[in-house]
Image: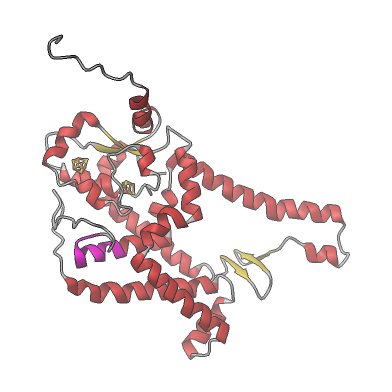
């Protein structure tokens, strides 16, 4: 569960460090899960492996005549339907209450997105090659980010390395991992294995360098369903903007906008933040910007009744009676 607004104040700038540690840990888990048989689908065996155990529906026993159809039906419910319903239900429940926490705190794709964003900003002053505006070299309260095209020399090989890792790891989720790593090490990949890794690396490289935000916004089913569940709950955890403190923004560099890895505007209404990943980079940037200010921090996580302001702001505006324009004479 994410910290409350008060806990967040105590956590201060360490929140982003903690988040990156959690992301890093999950990335390692993503790579090693197949190696240690924590979770993978073995296409050779034709079934999933879960924590070292064969996860089958038990239909082989039915075909062999060892069990009755009724028992086979029970197996399908117990081993297939219930675990899947439990996982899907759990993810929907977390998303309904907290939004895309998985994306912002765990997803191994989003950690790549953020890493490449940071390097792209160093190379060209933007989070993405498609952004129109160049970001300031230094946001209020933050360290300067000097710009130099030489960062491409780091950025492109790193994107290639991430693409290769992703393609290889995905293959180990489908075929015995030790066979894949052994074949890679000795240069003895089969034709299909080499094809999978080669084509996968190429596609991931294109996606990581040119379309990583597009994928997170529109291409990822997991992200999309989390967003839909989140939007259905008006009281869900949300980055809210305290309009009473908006004067603080006047002498700010829009640090929150500039920090957002999804290139959202964190002060806007919830509907426009459909793909928010709850990474809280905007809140951290705002805290840094207002660290010495007298105003307070306009951006905070809110849930429950306080979250309604963000969820309903547009609705309230739409339902409000149109203001009558008073003629000068009448006034
Ligand atoms: S709006 Fe804030 S919490 Fe949401 S993705 Fe952007 S920086 Fe992260
Ligand atoms: S919300 Fe915070 S970071 Fe964003 S412009 Fe206002 S003061 Fe700056």
| Picture coordinates of residue 319, whole percent (x, y) | 37, 23
Viewer-side residue, 258 vs 104: 258
| Picture coordinates of residue 265, whole percent (x, y) | 28, 45
Q: Quadrant of residue 28?
A: bottom left
Image quarter in which the C terminus is found: top left
Image quarter in which the N terminus is found: top left
| Picture coordinates of residue 114, whole percent (x, y) | 32, 60
Look at the picture and state if 144 lies above or below 101: below
Residue at screen point 22% across, 62% down: 121
Ligand 2 placement by image quarter: top left
Look at the picture and state if 154 lies above or below 246: below
Residue at screen point 15% across, 47% down: 253
- Which portion, as a residue range, is magenta? 116-126
Residue at screen point 25% across, 32% down: 242
Viewer-side residue, 305 vs 209: 209
Residue 162 visible in the shown view: yes
Q: How is the image coloured?
A: secondary structure
Viewer-side residue, 273 vs 4: 273
């Amino acid at each position: 569960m994410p910290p409350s607004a008060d806990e967040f104040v105590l956590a201060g700038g360490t929140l982003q460090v903690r988040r990156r540690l959690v992301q890093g840990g999950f990335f390692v888990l993503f790579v090693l899960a197949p190696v240690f048989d924590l979770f993978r689908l073995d296409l050779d065996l034709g079934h999933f492996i879960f924590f070292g155990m064969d996860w089958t529906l038990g239909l082989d026993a039915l075909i062999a005549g060892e069990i009755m159809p009724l028992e086979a039906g029970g197996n399908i419910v117990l081993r297939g339907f219930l675990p899947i319903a439990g996982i899907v239900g759990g993810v929907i429940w977390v998303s309904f209450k907290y939004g895309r926490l998985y994306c912002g705190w765990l997803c191994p794709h989003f950690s790549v997105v953020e890493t490449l964003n940071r390097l792209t900003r160093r190379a060209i002053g933007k989070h993405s090659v498609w952004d129109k505006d160049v970001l300031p070299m230094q946001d209020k309260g933050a360290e300067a980010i000097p710009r130099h095209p030489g960062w491409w020399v780091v950025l492109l090989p790193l994107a290639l390395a991430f693409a290769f890792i992703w393609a290889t790891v995905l293959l180990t989720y489908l075929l015995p991992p030790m066979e894949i790593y052994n074949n890679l090490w000795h240069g003895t990949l089969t034709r299909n294995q080499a094809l999978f890794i080669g084509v996968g690396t190429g596609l991931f490289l294109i996606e990581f360098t040119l379309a990583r935000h597009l994928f997170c916004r529109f291409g990822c089913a997991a992200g999309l369903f989390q967003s839909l569940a989140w939007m259905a709950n008006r009281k869900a955890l949300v980055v809210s903007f305290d309009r009473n403190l908006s004067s603080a923004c006047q002498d700010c560099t829009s640090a929150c906008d500039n920090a957002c890895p999804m290139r959202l505007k964190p002060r806007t209404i919830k509907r426009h933040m459909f793909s928010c990943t709850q990474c809280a980079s905007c809140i951290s940037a705002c805290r840094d910007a207002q660290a010495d200010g007298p105003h307070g921090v306009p951006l905070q996580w809110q849930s429950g009744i306080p979250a309604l302001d963000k969820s309903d702001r547009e609705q309230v505006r739409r339902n409000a009676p149109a203001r009558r324009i008073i003629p000068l004479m009448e006034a």
